[in-house]
Amino acid sequence: MRKWIWLMLLVLMTVAVLGSRGSTFFEQRPSPTIVKRIPVKTPELQPLREVDITPQVSTDKLLNHIQKLNFQRYTTKERSLTRTYITTELKKFGWKPKLEKFSDGVNIFAERPGTNKAAKAILVAAHYDTVASSPGADDNASGVAVVLEVARLLGSRPTPRALQLAFFDQEEAGLLGSQAFVSKTARLRNLGGAIVMDMVGYACYTPGCQKYPAGLPVTPPSDKGDFLAVVGDTEHLSLLNAFQSSQNIPSTALNKQESMPAVLTLPIPFKGLLTPDTLRSDHAPFWYQGVGAVLVTDTANLRTPHYHKSSDVPATIERSFFTGAAQIVVNATSALLEKD
């Protein structure tokens, strides 16, 4: 009898030991088929939110566009070749560009719709012609390259606002392409703002290399040409605000050795009547039609010695500055497209 009692005690002790070890094992390595995640609604443990990452521009693609456009774009034939290149690239990215003829030239226009039909579109634009005897790497293959990069990165990205693209002809002849564009008043009713690029690829880092026009409403930040200027009218400050915030927008970021330049935003009163130097590009016709528009620029002849010269070649493009400027435009455009 005692033998059976001791045997029973031994069995009970063995079960107890194995049971305790089994409990510890399953707590440390639970089976995924039976574990349930229970949401805890406390301020300390809020669910993680997916961060909207703005896509990264490609330096190689930007510079390749400038190399492909490394020729004078002044004559009728040269501008036709330029249009062929631009429309071919847009089609590669899934766009359906249209040629819009006017008396002195041909604009290129493309649009992809937004998810909110009531939200007004955002236009990104640049002129593609040059003056005679200049290949216009900075003026304005740099602007064309950035619009094409916007087309590549944001063309298939669903946003509340529609994204429109325009490539203006005959800017150098007196803003003729942009004037023809805004003459179609029906399209302006659904336009929430325009981002116009004219020379965004040159930087200088020697003190005194940057000049300024008289009558600016802000104090110049530096006598070096290491910033990107964004010129807008005071009636549409939301566009300027988007560029002020553009460096804080999450992105897959530039390479570590590259960075975005500082942004100088210039709010211009009275549609530039007191500062005529701020009216020298394709944003001005939009101002006169009451449509918000910003000019994004490296300040042209106020900075670069190659303005309207045969020396405006791809080798003069400052790679890091140009890439950073393009990223700023993509960031600001992306933010504006998300607004209902």
Image: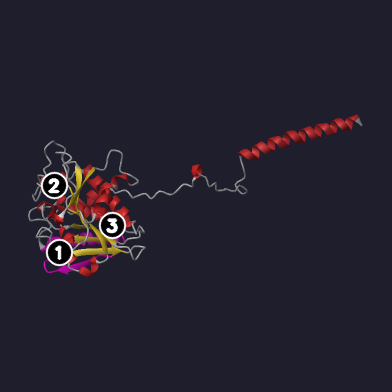
Label at residue 216? 2
| Residue in the foreground of this view, choosing between 56 and 180 | 180
Residue 254 within the segment the image draws in magenta: no
199 displayed left or right of 122? left
Amino acid type shown at disc 2: Leu
The quarter holding residue 192 reads: bottom left
Amino acid type shown at disc 1: Gln
At mark 3, the secondary structure is helix
Q: CA distance from mark 3 to mark 1?
A: 23 Å
Please tell me whether residue 115 is drawn above or below residue 298 in the rendered image. Answer: below
Select label 3 or label 1 by which is in front: 1
Label at residue 88? none
Label at residue 179? 1
Extent of the magenta region: 76-104
Q: Residues within 10 Å of mark 2 (few under 14, many from 20)?
A: some
Label at residue 151? 3
Residue 18: % across, % down: 72, 35
- Image quarter where the C terminus lies is bottom left
Marks 2 and 1, the one that precedes in the sequence: 1
